[in-house]
């Protein structure tokens, strides 16, 4: 009887501990779903977006009943990837490791929501996907038009460049709004306003990243 009671108490303690771990608002808790029975039992990986991917920095687990979860300790950007043998048709997903519960769906179009930075990242991701589709179509149309009407192709290119600049400025504005955060730093790194170039005479000059023109100092 005592053994049964002790076992019951131990199981109860573990259950309470696990429940508290899941609901701890100061920890990052990733709760994910993978759509597709063919992925049952396959491994899914949590990989740092930058830096070395080693046994110490990469976490993984088996998908069970279509679900998985991670408890990352670091506030940084991560990639979530299925085993490379099985990831065809699934969209890789980047997320921000931050306190709170992050709800993830891995599918042909993947999503992550539930915490402030990941909600903002999802908003940026949707805008990026729309931009990429439309901008790619514009470039294809320009390529076709160049052999037919070079003048029209020139104006089409100007419009495409303006469209792309609007998207870059949208990303920059979001980075500024999130300045000092993990996501803000990531977005800021995508489209800097300037860059450095070494000239033939050895001078290092500052260039406008949008016009590729030298900025006079």
Image: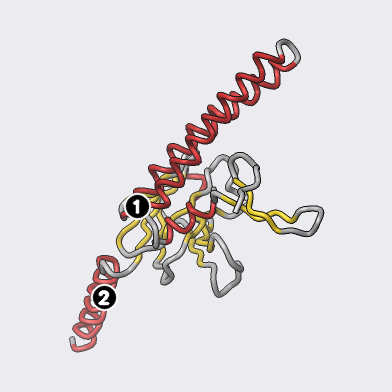
Quadrant in which the C terminus is drawn: bottom right
User: As displayed, is residue 172 above or below residue 63?
Assistant: above
Q: Residue furthest front?
A: 217
The label shown at residue 146 is none
Q: Earlier in the sequence, mark 2 or mark 1?
A: 2
Q: Is residue 209 left or right of residue 170?
A: right
**Residue 20 image point, x, y percent:** 24, 71
Name the side, left or right, on which 179 lies relative to 23: right
Image quarter where the N terminus lies is bottom left
What is the quadrant of residue 11 in the picture?
A: bottom left
- Residue 103: numbered disc: 1
**SS label for mark 1:** strand
- Mark 2–mark 1 Cα distance, whole angstroms, equals 21 Å
Q: Position of residue 192 (x, y in %)?
A: 54, 51
Q: Nearer the viewer, residue 174 or 56?
A: 174
Residue at 51% of width from left, 56% of height from top?
79
Q: Is residue 15 left or right of residue 177?
A: left
Is there a contact, CB below 8 Å, between mark 2 and mark 1?
A: no
Q: Is residue 176 above or below residue 142?
A: below
Say left or right for 193 vs 106: right
* Disc 2 element: helix
In this view, the residue in front, 132 or 145, is: 145
Q: Which residue is mark 2?
A: 17
- Residue at 72 percent across and 17 percent down: it is 146
Judge the density around disc 1: few (<14), some (14-19), many (≥20) Cα neighbours within 10 Å.
Answer: some
At a point 26% along the width and 66% down the height, the residue shown is 25
Residue that extends furthest to the right in the rendered view of this protein? 200
């Amino acid at each position: 009887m005592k053994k049964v009671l002790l076992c019951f108490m131990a199981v109860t303690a573990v259950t309470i501990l696990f429940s508290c771990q899941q609901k701890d608002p100061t920890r990052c808790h990733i709760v994910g779903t993978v759509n597709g029975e063919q992925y049952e039992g396959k491994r899914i990986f949590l990989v740092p977006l930058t830096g070395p991917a080693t046994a110490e920095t990469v976490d993984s687990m088996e998908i069970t009943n279509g679900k998985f979860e991670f408890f990352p300790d670091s506030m940084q950007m991560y990639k979530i990837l299925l085993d490379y043998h099985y990831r065809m048709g699934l969209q890789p997903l980047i997320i921000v490791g931050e306190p709170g519960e992050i709800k993830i769906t891995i599918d042909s179009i993947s999503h992550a929501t539930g915490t402030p930075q990941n909600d903002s990242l999802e908003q940026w991701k949707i805008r990026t996907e729309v931009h990429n589709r439309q901008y790619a179509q514009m470039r294809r149309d320009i390529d076709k038009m160049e052999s037919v009407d070079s003048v029209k192709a020139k104006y089409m290119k100007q419009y495409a460049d303006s469209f792309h600049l609007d998207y870059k400025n949208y990303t920059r504005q979001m980075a500024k709004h999130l300045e000092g955060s993990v996501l803000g730093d990531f977005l800021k790194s995508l489209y800097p306003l300037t860059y450095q170039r070494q000239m033939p005479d050895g001078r290092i000059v500052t260039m406008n990243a949008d016009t590729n023109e030298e900025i006079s100092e």
